[in-house]
Image (tube, grey):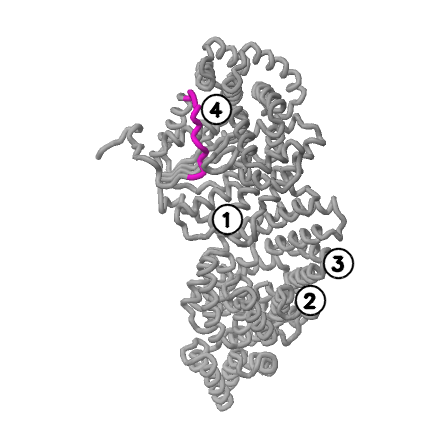
Amino acid sequence: MEVKTPEARFVRTGQPKIMGNVPPKNPNFTGRESLLAAVERQLTEDETTAVLPHALHGLGGVGKSQIAVEYVYRHSGDYNVIWWIPAEQESLILAALAELAASLGLQVGPQANTAVPAVREALRTGKPFDNWLLVFDNAEDIEAVRSYFPNGGPGKIIVTSRNREWERIATPLSVDVFDREESIALLQRRARGLSTHDAGRLAEALGDLPLAVEQAGAWHAATGMPVDEYLQLLDERRPEILELAPSPDYPLPVAAVWDISLGRLTAENPAARQLLQICACMAPEPIPLNMLRGGRNVQITPELDPVLRDPLLLARATRDLSKLSLVRLDHKAGTLQMHRLMQNVIVARLDPEERERMRNAAHLLLTTAKPGLPASPEQWSTYLGLLPHMIASGAVNSSDAWVRDLVFDMVTFLYYWGAHDAGADLTRQAWEAWSEQSAEEDLHVIRITKMLGFYLHHLGRIAEAAALSEQAMEVSRTAPIPEEEVIDSMLQQAGSLRYRGDFEAARELSAEAYERASDLYGPEDPTTLSAAHSYGLSLRVNGDFRQARAIDGESARQRELLYGPTSGLTVNTLSALAVDTREAGDFLEARALQESTYQTYRTHFGPTNAATIRAALNLAICRRRAGFLEGAAELVEEILERFTSRYGAAYPETLGAALAAVVDRRIAGRLEDSRRLGRQTLDGYRDIFGEHHPYTLCAMINVAATLRALGEVEEAERLDTVAGERLRADLGERHVYSLAAAFGRANDHYARLDFAGALEVDSATLPLLAEEAGEDHPFTLVCVANLSLDHRGLGHSAEADRLNAQAVEGLTRVLGEEHPWRTSARLHQRIEYDPTVIPL
């Protein structure tokens, strides 16, 4: 067998199959050969399959990122995949990994909370590509960044960071200043004609700090200033720079050389200096030049306004900044970028009033670049380009209405993009800032309050979300805000009431909002249709499926006329209509409707879109109710995996999928799996919704069915009894959940061979079911079938035969001859009824 030497392991064969986000190669890169060799040696000699990050440490300005960039370009042929990940903000990591998922061809869609777990798994397994290299650049928060590393895999990771704590978990490689020879080489490369003696004097004065050396070389190339004069300027700047002392990572040499360049810029091109000051208030990430070009419609300063309105003047200003090495232009990407130390230097030199003015200017430029609808995937890349600058500039603290609109759209985008934790954090920052700046009656304060409540509801923080929804509702009723905003607050509050389990109050408020919108705007208006959707949901959770079906059927028709058949609003209502149809007892029609709706979601939204996954869960339940058990169970397990990887186990929608899986596993005979998952799911509902919420009690009923199948009748009976008592007290004895609990209680009696007890419960339940659901509802017919078994157990053969024949005939008529319930009734087998949780 051939044994390869370390040098032979990597054979350059050209470019990697996939390479992305890597900054442009620095044409003036000089020296660092020993460091580059050390990086190569560490990566090559690491024989383990686990990912071991190799950290480049050093203070700001020593060139950590430039070394990583140079390594990538020199060794691009050594890897199948190379991906650069800006790691200073979590949103940047998410965006980079989501882009990598698309480049790898993973069919997971653009949402971060789907793409990121998928790409980490693809890297771990090495499929579709092994031998990969990830570079996490400027990774200061160790734990946050580590959480995005693949859990092993055939690849390598490089980390650049100023945080020396990385040494605890990574192979460190300290990056220091230049050797004197390297400094001289770079200076002479940038400033041709500079003597070795003068270059050495400059290098000594600059402490051989690479960033300062680069800047001084650019200055000399642009101005031709004699070295003696330049050194004198440096000495003059030092006392002033020392007084600023902005941070420990603020090297004096680079601050001084930049200060010289900034002084010249102020004299010769004040507009370019002001543009630089504005960019200094943003993130040290690429700034889209289109954002600056959009500034023609804003007023900032008399010097800068003409430049922003004239593309030629703007091009000259950015060129001047690049010539002095104050920014790095990437013409291919259409961006400019500043070093974070440069930003520190500039911001430190601004007085508070000027700093505020430049931040406000940054906010105005950001608003001119605001993309379209935040729910539209076509707009997401633009939102991602603006997000770090919006955060770094402190836009959440602005009181300007246009800036607040941008912030609101950004947090809405983060929800649709799937960065729910990041979105909730940013929303909370905005809510706290706006609440302090403006009265609670301010429209922006009301809207951001509702948005924060919306996020917290979806994250399962029900009590905190409820307080915010109540606050927004209370203020909205008296605040001078548009009527449609008041109705929106009512709908938000109705949703909060549903999350808290107060279904009747939710129905009353939804009905009020629906009537109010209908009277004001008519039945076809978008506000009315939103109110109708909420009203249908409230009717559903109250068990009034027939009225909900009528409301949703008309809403679906109106939304299709207004928005078209493939609109997200239209198909969302159609999915709700399928739930109404199913729970009203028309299982076969519900399944047919949801099959069609799900295909629309897959075709127009993609298979991994969050709304598509929700529609898939609805379809799986429709399939099970219609008797297509295998197709239902497979789909549910897939959905559960997707929700768990996307949101985690402690998430309302994950719990809904888990509860469906509990039922499917029981039906398939996987009783131990069903019990294990059932207990976890029940605990999850208790933690999020509380012990008394109807959905917690619904989970109890379904877990009890599994325990009964395992022969653990005593525990099943306890759960059914607790659930039944609480549901009757909170929702009344006629609610479908109360009747389902009674159904389970009768099955407990039957399992203990207490046929008289089962007969008593079934006999009391049947007339309520017939009245509430209808005599032909499958739930009612199942109760008839079980009642026949109660009589048979007591020796009442004639009555048992009569009831069984009635049940079999009815189930055959409404469900068909192949349905499992019809088969169980014909074979005189006890039937379980599994109540479902309605999506909130």
Disc 2 marks a residue whose amino acid type is Ala
Mark 3 vs mark 1, CA separation in Å = 35 Å
Q: Which residue is mark 2?
A: 513
Whichever of callouts 4 and 3 sits on the residue coming sooner in the sequence is 4
Of helix, strand and loop, which one carries label 1? helix
User: The residue under label 1 is which amino acid type?
Assistant: Ala
Asked if disc 4 and disc 3 are in contact, CB closer than 8 Å, the reply is: no
- Give the residue pinned by disc 3: 474
Closer to the eye: label 4 or 2: 2
Please report the bounds of the magenta region as a residue range: 20-32
Residue at 40% in and 67% down: 630
Residue 174 is tagged as: 4
Q: Secondary structure at mark 3?
A: helix
Q: Nearer the viewer, mark 4 or mark 3?
A: 3
Q: Quadrant of the C terminus?
A: bottom right
- 104 relative to 744 in the view: left or right: left
Instruction: Locate residue 839, reporting x and y percent.
Output: 57, 64
Q: Secondary structure at mark 2?
A: helix
User: Is disc 4 placed on a helix, strand or loop?
Assistant: strand
The numbered mark, 3 or 2, whose residue comes first in the sequence reads 3
The amino acid at mark 4 is: Ser
Q: Which mark is residue 368?
A: none
Going from N to C along the chain, the mark reached first, 3 or 1, is 1
Q: Residue 455 colored magenta? A: no
Q: Residue drawn 54% across and 16% down? A: 206
Q: Which mark is residue 112?
A: 1
